[in-house]
Image: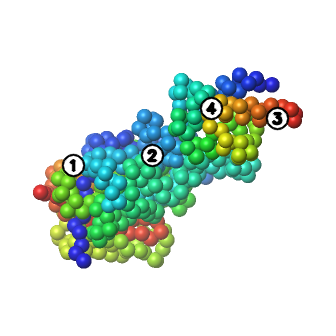
Amino acid sequence: MISDEQVYQQVTQIMAEEFELEPESLQPDATLYEDLGLDSLDAVDMVVALEKAFGMKMTDEEAVRSVRTLADLFDLVCRLKNRQVTKE
Amino acid sequence: MSLKRVVITGRGAVSPFGLGVADLLDGVWNGRSGIQLMPDWQRIQGLQCHMAGPVPPFDAKPLLSRTLRRTMGPMAIYATLAAKEAVSDSGLEPDFLASGKVGVAIGSTTGSPLIYEALYRQFLPEESVEQVRSGMFFKIMGHCCAANVCLALGITGEQWAPTSACTSSAQALGLGYMLIRSGRQDAVLCGGADEVHPTVTMVFDVIKAASRSHDLPLTTPRPFDLYRDGVVCGEGGGILVLESLDSALRRKTNIYCEILGFGHVNDSKSIAVPHEGSMARTMYNALAEAGLNGDDIDYVNAHATGTVSGDIAEAVAINSIFGKDVPVSSYKGHLGHTLGAAGALETIVLLEMLNRQEVVPTLNLERPDPACSGINLVHSVDKLSLNMVLKNSFALGGVNTAMMLQRWTA
């Protein structure tokens, strides 16, 4: 099973590669839209990239919409991963 | 309502010779070929032409931001880089681009074939769209070049995207000319772009109109030559800034030429077979709109792609309007057929001929086909007094265009 720390590292790497962001900008309190400059099209691609990387579905659109910061995103991915493990 | 005079004030190019107008002109004036073998295409069953004129590899990352690139396939990147160069060349300021008085007319044969391939490679195996990214549609839509150029440059005027295969950018130039002439726009970025892809070459291959001279790729295509054996597809993007003369004079910008007429006729006899009568009619219409006769013309830049029937039809048509003395050449030997970019890229080279007062011959033309002997085919780079010149562009589907240009002398 993948640890929360590994999730953190993998999400950071995906965000850096997908959106060509400098690693030092990817701080937990960085907001996706204001600080990292993402927009609604990027949010769609972010979900596709994360779903592929972690082999899961992020179908709860309300939960995705409520993500403001990278820390929120890590929490959401960890929650979904853990739920997936519980189901398995 | 009085009609506006229309001039060309900017040029931008991405071509098989590289990024920028300077590389394009350097390749043409040095008699180089942009054609190469595409060995990887041998894997494709039934495809018999394994040659193309691709743009040399480059990294678009430092040239365009990620948010722009995410909705661009290669052709939109070519169009945008060419548009940026043309805007810079013309000295169009951001405020003018955002004034609503500047529009675009930029076409292509289709949206990006490379991205279409990527989409269907994802979609077909499992009939799934789960991995489709948000930028996909914007790369394959018919107006991918026009829309992305507008976004990149902050253009807020009219957005048009003629899609007529090999005449896409020629139609775009004609459309821009009409938009400015009528007073709807003060300036229009006009041109087109297209990509090298096996499914594009396939179009010509299946109708036996693509070259198969793989033993000597640098000597094909051979427009007007007795041993020509068809088209080789190239790629790139060409953009010209068309502007009202009033606006250009007000901005005190450099003027390359004035557009005096645009002929545009349909051939309803066949969707695929070139028709010399329609070609002649479009040339005649361009001349008539300019108030000129065949005798007034100093040079004709032929569409001539190197197909057996197309080159003969065009030679016969040119002869019927201009007789046998007007110098004629084609740039397809240098560039291949850059399809939706051809009309604009070739006009850029033509403007340089006006500037240098030199004619460039058709590359790879060694033994003129006797069936094309009714015209004066240029064989070397020669100094020539060039004032009035005509540019032909034709397309599958029956489209025939001709643009009448006059050198600008202030």
Instruction: Name the residue beneath numbered marker 2.
Output: B77
Question: Residue at horizontal 65%, vertical 47%?
Answer: B132
Q: Earlier in the sequence, mark 2 or mark 1?
A: 2
Q: Which mark is residue A84?
A: 3
The residues bearing labels 2 and 1 have C-alpha atoms spaced at a distance of 32 Å
Q: Considering only vertical position in the picture, is B291 above or below B369? A: below
| Marks 3 and 1 in Cβ contact (< 8 Å) | no
| Cα gap from disc 3 to disc 1, whole angstroms | 72 Å
Query: In the image, is B133 to the left or to the right of B404?
Result: right
Q: Earlier in the sequence, mark 3 or mark 4?
A: 4
Q: Residues within 10 Å of mark 3 (few under 14, many from 20)?
A: few
Q: Circle 1 is placed at which residue position? A: B381
Q: Is residue B105 above or below residue B153?
A: below
In the figure, is residue B102 to the left or right of B65? left
Amino acid type for the residue under numbered disc 1 = Val
Left or right placement of residue B83 versus residue B326 in this view:
right
